[in-house]
Image (cartoon, rainbow, N blue to C red):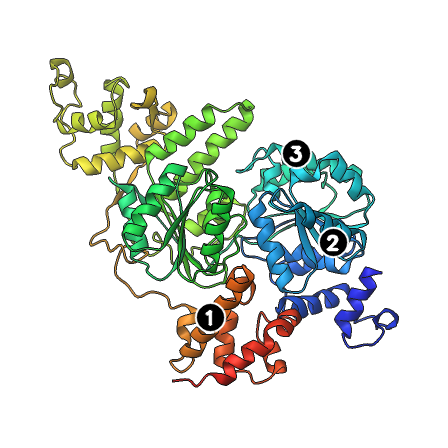
Amino acid sequence: MKRERRVAEAVEPRHKDPMTLTLSPVDASPIVAARDILRRTFGHAEFRGLQAQVIGEVLAGRSAMAVLPTGGGKSLCYQIPAMMRPGLGLVVSPLIALMTDQVAALTQSGVAAARLDSNVEPEDKAETWRRIDAGELDLLYVSPEGLMQPWMLDRLGRTPLSLIAIDEAHCVSQWGHDFRPEYRMLGRLAELFPTVPRLAVTATADARTRDDIRAELRLLDGAEFVDSFARPELVLSAERKRGGADKRVIELVTARPGRSGVVYAGSRDKTEKLAEALRAAGVPALAYHAGLDKRLRETRLEDFLQADAAVMVATIAFGMGVDKPDVRFVIHADPPGSIEAYWQEIGRAGRDGETAEGITLYGAADMAWALRRIDGREMDAAVKQVQVRKVRQLYALLDGAGCRAATVRRYFGEEAVEACGQCDLCAGTVETTDATEAAQKALSAAARLGGRYGRGRLVDHLLGKTKDVTEQEKSLSTWGIGTELSAAQWRDLTEQLLFEGLLREDPNDGRPLVGVGDAEAVRAVFRGELRVAMRKPPEGYDPSTRSGRPRKRTREAMASLGPADQPLFEALRAWRAAEAKAQHVPPYVIFHDRSLAEIAAARPASHAALARVNGVGEAKLEHYGAAVLAVVAGFAGP
């Protein structure tokens, strides 16, 4: 009965008896009804990208896999079908923060949604089950561990299900960047619920990972939807670490005052130290990691989500469940582990479609640490080989000379990709020069030193400045042959040769030793068949700009408001902040900044006019319409 009710309401909401409403063939189209729900419930006029195709497949009762970019509206692909099909929509999600955020946003939009996880109080769990049994719930969010408990499967087996959505489906694959063994169990859902359509969704999966997801979840007969990985609002850049990387992070953040941002660090201790240093520099920064008390984590997350300008310094687990739309920058103080992880974490910025920045700091020591970590893991040799290749592909992206966005898109299998025109490499802020001859000298020196010394000693050897040098070393043909480059340039070239595998580093219990790498590639360099390009350091570097050179910033949509509208926009934000604080929810689940800006510009005087604003659905119109109109009507202006 649930589907007929939803379709009827979507076509004619004021009909006194929607259950008996006769629909015309055109109006009965599932996508027409889905589009009405999109507008009336979520406040959006049209579907984006492949959303309509994915939703149509699920509404037809067929299983599928969808790979849509971060911020591309993956959740709507299962939320809307769950509202239209009879039964309960079951969503499997890996993080409590992700479930909490989505349930809060759905509730604000008038959708009957709940979650079951370890943070839910017993009385609330009992009420959720009562609503499930009464058929009052559209969507239920659970973790994979919780779902696969025998008692949970037994109870759900007696509950009519409209669909099963597996969010962050890349966690299923051992070839992916965030493999979670508990996700492998979800393949059993095909036999436990054979008549229920299943939808696997993710933002980051290359071709091999997609094949593995479909095989593990038994979706080989289902359709596969892969949208473009383009994120034109993201401006990407990367810098090699030089000296104090933490100092550089502080420079980058303080050069972007009044903006929300995320800084990713590689350890819990580093998040605390960086957050403390940022606070000392006047930045409202918070640390977030798994070692914090659960309530403290919740409080800090709520503070970050509610703030118009705050910086969260976090380990990489943070962010998967955070849908804060106005994050203007993501900075990796330590690089991620793969291109998939990079694109997902950078993708936390600019979810409102406005210009945002993704900045990554990296070094050869980071790559060496990542490779050692993989080497120490218990995994199949073939899987380990793939993970090593993913690390090298990431550093080739970071240290390369081609468009960053285009490189990512090609990595995921897109063809005919054009340069973005705005990353640091496209903007021409990274220049290169032929360094093949210098590379030959460095490789020769590493070979003659026999892999017995570290990078510093290799550089000193090339410059002829080794302290307490032995007569044997001085007699080597490579002693002092590199005076055409400075010590800093030799260090940069050494890092590049390490990134490219021409040199290798032996960990040596924390005192890495440099030796010759891939023998065939090294021979190609000496034969002149493989050229080596070295980066030139930028002149007049300016930390306050994404490119490093002073130039005009792209104006954001909020800044395009006229002077007469800006005060009303700020008044609406103040109202929203108070409302969010009273409800203990992030401000953006009430209204996004873009909606408030549109209201400030349009100055609607009626509920009907307010309903035409993007992002204002029926539930929000009912809950907040009078208050918003009062702010607009009572605002005297400048």
Q: Which residue is mark 3?
A: 184
Q: Which residue is mark 1?
A: 573
The amino acid at mark 1 is Arg
Distance from the alpha carbon under mark 3 to that under mark 2:
22 Å
Of all residues, the one furthest to the top in this rendering is 472
Give the image location of residue 284, x and y in percent. Answer: 36, 55
Which of 2 and 530 lies nearest the eye of the viewer? 2
Q: Residue at x 49, y 63 (%)?
A: 353
**Mark earlier in primary sequence (3, 2):** 2
Figure quadrant of residue 364? top left
Q: Is residue 351 left or right of residue 150?
A: left
* Residue 163, above or below 51: above
Give the image location of residue 319, x and y in percent. Answer: 49, 48
Give the image location of residue 632, x and y in percent. Answer: 50, 81
- Disc 3, SS: helix
* Residue 188, above or below 298: above
Which of 7 and 19 lies nearest the eye of the viewer? 19
Distance from the alpha carbon under mark 1 to that under mark 3:
44 Å
Figure quadrant of residue 243? top left
Question: Callout 3 environment at 10 Å: few (<14), some (14 to 19), or many (20+)?
Answer: some
Q: Which residue is mark 2?
A: 58
Q: Is residue 102 left or right of residue 537?
A: right
The amino acid at mark 2 is Val
Q: Residue at x 81, y 65 (%)?
A: 5
Q: Residue at x 61, y 32 (%)?
A: 181
The amino acid at mark 3 is Arg
